[in-house]
Amino acid sequence: MATSSTRAVADALPTALVYKTPSCGCCNLWVDHMREAGFEVDARNLNDLIPVKIDAGVPPRMSSCHTALIDGYVVEGHIPAEHVKRLLEERPDVVGIAVPGMPIGSPGMEGIGARPYQVLSWDRDGNMEVYAEVDPRR
Protein backbone atom coordinates (compact mmCIF):
# COMPACT_ATOMS: atom_id res chain seq x y z
CA MET A 1 0.00 0.00 0.00
CA ALA A 2 1.35 3.43 -0.89
CA THR A 3 2.06 5.84 1.92
CA SER A 4 0.95 9.44 1.75
CA SER A 5 4.55 10.53 1.12
CA THR A 6 4.87 8.00 -1.73
CA ARG A 7 1.65 9.36 -3.23
CA ALA A 8 2.96 12.92 -2.86
CA VAL A 9 6.13 12.03 -4.77
CA ALA A 10 4.10 10.28 -7.48
CA ASP A 11 1.72 13.24 -7.75
CA ALA A 12 4.55 15.74 -8.16
CA LEU A 13 7.24 13.92 -10.11
CA PRO A 14 9.85 16.29 -11.53
CA THR A 15 10.88 16.34 -15.17
CA ALA A 16 13.72 14.01 -16.09
CA LEU A 17 16.24 15.65 -18.41
CA VAL A 18 17.82 12.71 -20.24
CA TYR A 19 20.95 12.98 -22.36
CA LYS A 20 21.44 10.11 -24.78
CA THR A 21 22.81 9.39 -28.22
CA PRO A 22 20.41 9.51 -31.19
CA SER A 23 20.90 5.85 -32.18
CA CYS A 24 20.57 4.20 -28.76
CA GLY A 25 17.46 2.02 -28.77
CA CYS A 26 17.85 0.86 -25.17
CA CYS A 27 17.96 4.51 -24.03
CA ASN A 28 14.67 5.12 -25.84
CA LEU A 29 13.17 2.11 -24.04
CA TRP A 30 14.35 3.46 -20.66
CA VAL A 31 12.78 6.84 -21.49
CA ASP A 32 9.52 4.97 -22.24
CA HIS A 33 9.87 3.14 -18.89
CA MET A 34 10.22 6.45 -17.04
CA ARG A 35 7.23 7.96 -18.85
CA GLU A 36 5.13 4.89 -18.04
CA ALA A 37 6.11 5.40 -14.38
CA GLY A 38 4.69 8.93 -14.47
CA PHE A 39 7.75 11.05 -15.18
CA GLU A 40 7.73 13.79 -17.77
CA VAL A 41 10.88 13.25 -19.81
CA ASP A 42 12.83 15.77 -21.85
CA ALA A 43 15.10 13.50 -23.93
CA ARG A 44 17.97 15.26 -25.67
CA ASN A 45 20.15 13.61 -28.26
CA LEU A 46 23.88 14.35 -28.26
CA ASN A 47 26.64 12.66 -30.20
CA ASP A 48 29.09 13.00 -27.28
CA LEU A 49 27.88 12.40 -23.73
CA ILE A 50 31.27 12.62 -22.02
CA PRO A 51 31.03 16.38 -21.29
CA VAL A 52 27.58 15.86 -19.72
CA LYS A 53 28.89 13.03 -17.55
CA ILE A 54 31.93 15.08 -16.47
CA ASP A 55 29.79 18.15 -15.66
CA ALA A 56 27.35 15.97 -13.71
CA GLY A 57 30.15 14.34 -11.72
CA VAL A 58 29.57 10.78 -12.91
CA PRO A 59 32.58 8.66 -11.89
CA PRO A 60 33.91 6.82 -14.96
CA ARG A 61 33.33 3.39 -13.35
CA MET A 62 29.63 4.31 -12.86
CA SER A 63 29.10 5.24 -16.50
CA SER A 64 26.33 3.88 -18.69
CA CYS A 65 24.75 4.80 -22.02
CA HIS A 66 22.60 7.72 -20.84
CA THR A 67 22.60 10.33 -18.10
CA ALA A 68 19.51 11.89 -16.55
CA LEU A 69 19.31 14.94 -14.32
CA ILE A 70 16.29 14.80 -12.03
CA ASP A 71 15.52 17.30 -9.27
CA GLY A 72 19.15 17.88 -8.28
CA TYR A 73 20.26 14.26 -8.67
CA VAL A 74 22.17 12.42 -11.38
CA VAL A 75 20.51 9.20 -12.54
CA GLU A 76 22.98 7.22 -14.63
CA GLY A 77 21.90 4.26 -16.71
CA HIS A 78 19.10 1.75 -16.65
CA ILE A 79 17.73 2.35 -13.15
CA PRO A 80 14.22 1.10 -12.40
CA ALA A 81 11.80 4.01 -11.92
CA GLU A 82 10.83 2.72 -8.47
CA HIS A 83 14.38 3.41 -7.25
CA VAL A 84 14.39 6.87 -8.81
CA LYS A 85 11.13 7.59 -6.97
CA ARG A 86 12.66 6.27 -3.74
CA LEU A 87 15.67 8.58 -4.26
CA LEU A 88 13.36 11.58 -4.68
CA GLU A 89 11.32 10.62 -1.63
CA GLU A 90 14.23 9.90 0.72
CA ARG A 91 16.52 12.71 -0.55
CA PRO A 92 19.81 11.13 0.60
CA ASP A 93 23.00 13.21 0.61
CA VAL A 94 24.38 11.74 -2.60
CA VAL A 95 25.23 13.11 -6.02
CA GLY A 96 23.30 10.38 -7.72
CA ILE A 97 22.58 6.75 -8.39
CA ALA A 98 23.79 4.54 -11.19
CA VAL A 99 23.51 1.16 -12.82
CA PRO A 100 26.95 0.89 -14.43
CA GLY A 101 27.10 -0.72 -17.83
CA MET A 102 23.97 -2.13 -19.37
CA PRO A 103 22.86 -5.22 -17.41
CA ILE A 104 20.43 -7.57 -19.12
CA GLY A 105 17.09 -7.41 -17.33
CA SER A 106 17.28 -3.74 -16.39
CA PRO A 107 14.60 -1.37 -17.77
CA GLY A 108 15.32 -0.90 -21.46
CA MET A 109 17.60 -3.95 -21.49
CA GLU A 110 14.99 -6.65 -20.97
CA GLY A 111 15.75 -9.99 -22.51
CA ILE A 112 16.80 -13.58 -22.08
CA GLY A 113 19.53 -14.06 -19.51
CA ALA A 114 18.41 -11.44 -16.99
CA ARG A 115 20.57 -11.49 -13.88
CA PRO A 116 20.58 -9.63 -10.56
CA TYR A 117 22.37 -6.29 -10.51
CA GLN A 118 22.99 -3.39 -8.15
CA VAL A 119 21.97 0.25 -8.14
CA LEU A 120 24.90 2.17 -6.69
CA SER A 121 25.04 5.64 -5.14
CA TRP A 122 27.96 8.02 -4.87
CA ASP A 123 28.56 11.14 -2.83
CA ARG A 124 30.60 14.31 -3.38
CA ASP A 125 33.72 12.65 -1.96
CA GLY A 126 33.43 9.77 -4.42
CA ASN A 127 32.29 7.24 -1.82
CA MET A 128 30.10 4.54 -3.35
CA GLU A 129 27.49 2.35 -1.70
CA VAL A 130 24.92 -0.17 -2.81
CA TYR A 131 21.63 1.72 -3.00
CA ALA A 132 19.49 -1.24 -4.07
CA GLU A 133 19.74 -4.87 -5.08
CA VAL A 134 17.59 -5.70 -8.11
CA ASP A 135 16.60 -9.14 -9.33
CA PRO A 136 14.61 -8.75 -12.57
CA ARG A 137 13.77 -12.48 -12.55
CA ARG A 138 11.23 -11.92 -9.78
Image: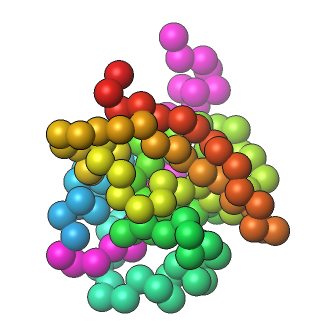
Outermost residue toward the right?
125
Residue 4 part of the magenta segment = yes
Q: The C terminus is located in which quarter?
A: top left
What colouring does the structure picture have?
rainbow
Please state the horizontal and vertical placement of residue 101, each as a whole percent of the image: 41, 62
Residue at position x 35%, y 58% in the image: 102
Q: Work out whether 32 lies above or below 127.
A: above
Q: In this view, does 122 lie to the left or right of 44?
A: right
**Residue at the (60%, 83%) spot, across then down:** 55
Between residues 91 and 15, which one lies in front from this camera angle? 91
Return the residue nearer the eye: 115 or 69. Answer: 115
The answer to whether any part of residue 36 appears in the image is no
- Which residue ends up furthest to the top in the rendered image? 1
Can you see residue 120?
yes
Residue 111 image position (x, y, % from top left) = 19, 42
Left or right of residue 101: residue 6: right
- Location of residue 34 with respect to 75 vertically, above or below: above
Question: Where is 135 relative to 43, above or below?
Answer: above
Instruction: Count the labels in the image.
Output: 0
Residue drawn 54% across and 47% down?
119
Looking at the image, residue 97 lies above or below residue 11: below
Measuring from the top left, give residue 84's x and y in whole percent.
52, 45
What residue lies at 56% left-to-right and 69% top-to-bottom? 61
For the record, the magenta segment spans: 1-23
In percent of width and height, residue 87 lies at 62, 44
In the image, 95: left or right of 31? right
